[in-house]
Structure formats: C-alpha cells, structure tokens
Image (cartoon, rainbow, N blue to C red):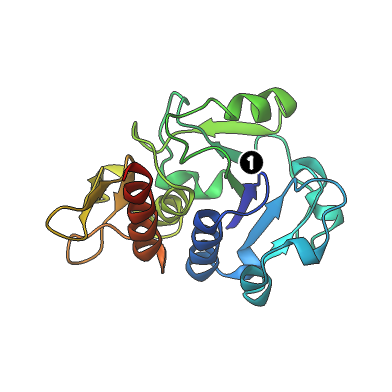
C-alpha cells in the first residue's frame, strides 16, 4: 500500500513534523510520499528529522508523482482513494484490492473542519474515489493508522476501537481536550505520535501564560 500526504500547510509546524514522523514509523518510508510541496522547495526546507527517516517528497502534484519518486508508477483513474470526511461510504477491507494509493493530509485534522478535499476532487475528478473513515475528525496519522488497520490488517472499521476527544490532564488545574478521534492501544489509551503529549502540554502552558 502506498500512502500520499498532500501537504497543504505553509511550512512544517512542530505538530506536523511529529505526525509525519509517526506515519513514517507506522508505514515505512518506502510507502509514504509527501506531495504538492510549493514549487522551488529544496531539501534544506524539509525538516532534517523527516529526511533522516527517509521521507520521500516532491513538488509534483498527484498525477505526476511518478516522475520524481522511484518505484511509483503513474496513478490510474479509479485506483486512488481519497479519504474524505464527507464521502458517502466508509472504506472496506475488501477494497485493499481496489485501490493502489490512499491520499491524505491537509484533509483531516483541521478544527473546525474545512472542506479542503473539494479542491482535490475538482482537480482530479476521474482519478480520485472518495471513502470515509467514520463521522469524526481524525489527525492525519490517526487516519493513516485506521486505513492500515482496514486494508492491511483486514479489520472492519466497526471493529476498530477509538477514543473520541480525549482530555489530557497535566496537573490538578491544567488539562487539554483534543477535538479528534484516536485509535487506542492495548491499554485503551489514545495513540499519539511520539513527543506529541509533551508538545500539547507545552502549548497548554503557553496558552495559560498568555492569559496571565
């Protein structure tokens, strides 16, 4: 399975770097491509942490990724799944044979959600087929993790255990609720990228300082 993240953000925030790093750990660098970076982007503008992990990236759009990334053939119409919160049907295990590529990023994880998939659907009306991952917003790494469980592990969406809108408490007076759905681990705890909890805590402390 090949996973494509359409990078629709300006630059790379700490949050995005942690998410992308976790995706690389989960699916392997050979199975992930970051596409549609601004024209003229150089390796010096890509976070070293991601390059050191083997991130494949390109300024080319979906239809031309194969021109830059070795080992990836041209995408065929109807064989590319766009994970779209507004799609009418959920991704099914049997569709592992239907799709060659799964497209994410700049799509899921916004709060409040924006219909950024509309841009992609209009740009590639024949190439992309929309599928949904339930009715709750997910971070990009969670969406890819969920897709892996469905198409690689053949686990129906209904059997995947999630934790919606977890609240992380850092002290008696300090807590942050995340407005997303997360896959849970064996202990029933939401799975976050490595380092994300510390970043959430730091951001929470910064927000508190701004109020004082």
Residues packed near mark 1 inside 10 Å, few (<14), some (14 to 19) or many (20 plus): many
Q: Position of residue 195 (x, y in %)?
A: 41, 68
Quadrant, the C terminus: top left
Q: Position of residue 7 (x, y in %)?
A: 66, 46
The residue depicted at 67 percent of the width and 50 percent of the height is 11
Residue named by callout 1? 80
**Can residue 45 be spotted in the picture?**
yes
Q: Position of residue 18 (x, y in %)?
A: 50, 62
The residue depicted at 65 percent of the width and 34 percent of the height is 78
The residue depicted at 50 percent of the width and 32 percent of the height is 84
Query: Left of 97 or right of it: where is 154?
Result: left
Which quadrant of the view contains residue 125?
Answer: top right
Residue lying furthest front:
212
Give the secondary structure at mark 1: strand
Q: Position of residue 121 (x, y in %)?
A: 65, 26
Quadrant, the N terminus: bottom right
In the rendered picture of this protein, how many numbered marks are placed on residues? Answer: 1
* 114 over 108 or under it: above or below: above
Which quadrant of the view contains residue 91?
Answer: top left
């Amino acid at each position: 399975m090949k996973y494509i993240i359409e990078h629709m953000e300006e630059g790379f925030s700490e949050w995005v770097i942690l998410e992308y790093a976790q995706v690389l750990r989960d699916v392997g660098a050979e199975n992930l491509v970051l596409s549609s970076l601004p024209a003229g982007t150089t390796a010096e503008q890509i976070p070293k942490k991601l390059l050191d992990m083997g991130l494949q990236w390109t300024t080319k759009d979906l239809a031309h990724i194969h021109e830059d990334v070795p080992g990836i053939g041209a995408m065929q119409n109807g064989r590319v799944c766009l994970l779209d919160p507004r799609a009418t049907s959920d991704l099914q295990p049997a569709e592992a044979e239907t799709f060659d590529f799964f497209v994410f990023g700049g799509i899921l994880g916004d709060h409040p959600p924006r219909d950024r998939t509309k841009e992609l659907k209009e740009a590639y009306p024949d190439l992309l087929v929309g599928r949904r991952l339930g009715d709750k917003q997910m971070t990009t790494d969670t969406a890819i993790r969920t897709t892996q469980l469905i198409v690689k592990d053949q686990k129906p969406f209904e059997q995947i255990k999630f934790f919606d809108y977890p609240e992380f408490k850092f002290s008696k007076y300090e807590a942050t609720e995340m407005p997303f759905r997360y896959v849970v681990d064996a202990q029933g705890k939401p799975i976050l990228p490595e380092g994300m909890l510390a970043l959430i805590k730091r951001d929470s402390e910064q927000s508190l300082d701004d109020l004082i």
